[in-house]
Image (cartoon, rainbow, N blue to C red):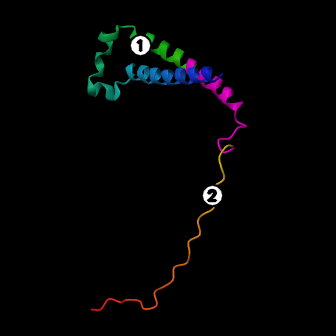
Amino acid sequence: MEMIRTLLIILEAACCLALIGLVLLQKSKSGGLGLAFGGGGNDSLFGARAGNVLTKATIGIGVLFLINTLVLGMMFAGSANKSLMDGAKAPAAPLQQAPTALPENPVTPSE
C-alpha cells in the first residue's frame, strides 16, 4: 500500500509539472505579456493546430490530476485516525534554576 501511495504522489508531482509546462506553452488569446518576450513564434514552432493539441493535452492531464488527487485524498483519509503526535514523548519538565544570590558588597563603577 505504501508503494502505491508513493507512485501516486510521484504521478501527482509529474502532473503538476506537466500542467505548468502546458499552460505556459499555450498562446494567450490577447497576446498578453508573452508577446513582449517573443512569444509570437509558437505558431511556427508547433504548427498551426498546436493550440488544439495543447488544449486537449491540458484538459487530459488536468482530469488525470483531479482523479489522482481524489484517490490520494481517499487513501490518506483512512489514516486520518493516526496522529503524528501519538508516538511523541511528553516534553521534559523544565529545569529549575537555583536562585542566584546577590553579592554582599556589590562593586559599583566609580567615575
Is 79 within the magenta?
Answer: yes
For the residue pair 34 and 9, the one nearer the viewer reads as 9
Tell me whether circle 1 and circle 2 mark residues in contact (CB < 8 Å): no
- Calculate the distance from the C-alpha at mark 1 to the C-alpha at mark 2: 62 Å
Instruction: Identify which amino acid the numbered label 2 is placed on.
Output: Ala
Position of residue 39 measured from the top left corner of the image (x, y, whole percent): 30, 21
Let me know if residue 67 appears in the view. no
Position of residue 86 measured from the top left corner of the image (x, y, whole percent): 69, 44
Is 4 above or below relative to 89? above
Let me know if residue 47 appears in the view. yes
Q: Determine the secondary structure under disc 2.
A: loop
**What residue lies at 29% left-to-right and 10% top-to-bottom?**
44
Displayed quadrant of residue 31: top left
For the residue pair 81 and 34, the one nearer the viewer reads as 81
- Which residue bears the numbered disc 1? 51
Position of residue 63 measured from the top left corner of the image (x, y, whole percent): 57, 18
Is 66 above or below relative to 99? above
Is 25 within the magenta?
Answer: no
**Quadrant occupied by the N terminus:** top right
Q: Determine the secondary structure under disc 1.
A: helix
